[in-house]
Image: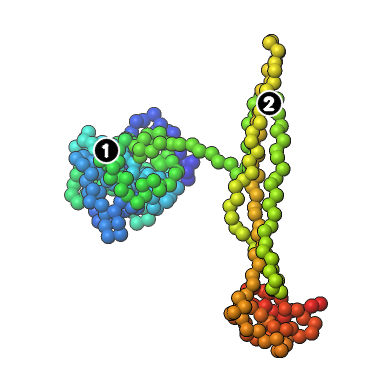
Amino acid sequence: MKAFYLSLWALAGSASAYLATTTRYYDGQEGACGCGSSSGLSSWQLGISNGVYTAAGSQALFDTNDSSWCGGGCGKCYNLTSTGTSACNGCGEGGVAGESIIVMVTNLCPYNGNEVWCPSVGAKNNYGYSYHFDIMAESEVFGDNVVVNFEPVACPGQAALDWGTCVCHGQTDTDTTPAGMAAAAAESAGTVATSSSSSSSSTSTVKTSTTLVAVPTSPVKEVASSSTSSTSTVKSIPTVVAESSPAAVVEPTSTAISTPQGAATTSTTSVTQYTTVTEIATVWVTPNPSATTCSSSAVQTLYGQCGGINWTGATTCVSGSTCKVQNPYYYQCVSSA
């Protein structure tokens, strides 16, 4: 489907404009580009400025990957020039040939429920057109269902400012919409492409076409476990302390190489290695004596509780079992075997 869609653009690539059908609508809703709120649309959607309006685009204009919210076509502007005729006899009066307006896409005209006018990506509507603009207006602004030549343009200043207030501003899908107009469409949306790169590797190496000199790194820092001794008979509970410790950094080293005049030169490349050290601490937990009253005369059965914070029962386990710390609040008699 998408290959067919792209081929349509390739066949029409020499043209500066493309044909589309138009209609007019008003529903009072914010639309699929989030230009308003749940209570209604932003008032500027009814007319940004003289000759500048908003429109719901068919799927190929809204998002080529069939998104129905924050599509890649949101906030993009197009110049529409009337051909003077409607799509068919009986489906509109047309308009004045050569008359132009600018529209900004702020909504989706979905295929489902609008099959007559709004085609799916790569398909055509009932009148043989691959694109459709449903202009937001309460009264006629640009003829009556006129067929237009359209081309992407930079959004006028006020339109660009208004687009900046929409929920989807900066959140639109990144697929190319519409296909075949990437450069112009990006300009009309007022976006600048940037590139970035990242790496999960902890060692970075710079290479040249000359000899690479390996630089030995220093040993990994060893961190000893810290603990606090206690005269209590309570056993320790090992705890991994989740803390971010600074990485041990091996400074890059360079070696100067003396080269006689006329001899081949050799450059030195530095290798920087980063080693992350995780510190582990052992925390000893001792119940508060004042909070625990022990009964030394009673004997607890196997798998019974034998201690813990606020425990007032037996602390001695039956023969053949040992009192084991399960957590600070629960010690249990377990088999010594």
Rendered residue at 69%/79% (across/down): 332
Task: Check the image and report above or below for 119 versus 286.
Answer: above
Depth check: give the residue in front, 230 or 46: 230
Disc 2 crowd, CA 10 A, few/some/many (<14, 14-19, 20+): few
Q: What residue type is labelled 1?
A: Gly
Asked which secondary structure carries label 1, the reply is helix
Q: Where is residue 334 in the image (x, y as percent from the top left)?
A: 74, 79
| Residue 134 visible | yes
Task: Check the image and report above or below for 208 versus 202.
Answer: above
Q: Where is residue 248 in the image (x, y as percent from the top left)?
A: 64, 44
Task: Find disc 1 in the rendering and name its residue.
Answer: 157
Task: Find disc 2 in the rendering and name its residue.
Answer: 255
Q: Which of marks 2 and 1 is in front?
A: 2
Rendered residue at 70%/12% (across/down): 260
Rendered residue at 31%/40% (across/down): 77
Q: What residue type is labelled 2?
A: Thr
Who comes first in sequence, dot 2 or dot 1? 1
Is residue 236 found left or right of 159 in the rendered image? right
Asked which secondary structure carries label 2, the reply is loop
Is residue 192 found left or right of 254 in the rendered image? left
Q: Where is residue 207 in the image (x, y as percent from the top left)?
A: 65, 29
Disc 1 crowd, CA 10 A, few/some/many (<14, 14-19, 20+): few
Based on the displayed image, in which of its 4 quarters is residue 127 positioned?
A: top left
Depth check: give the residue in front, 185 or 232: 232
Distance of mark 2 from mark 1, alpha carbons?
A: 57 Å
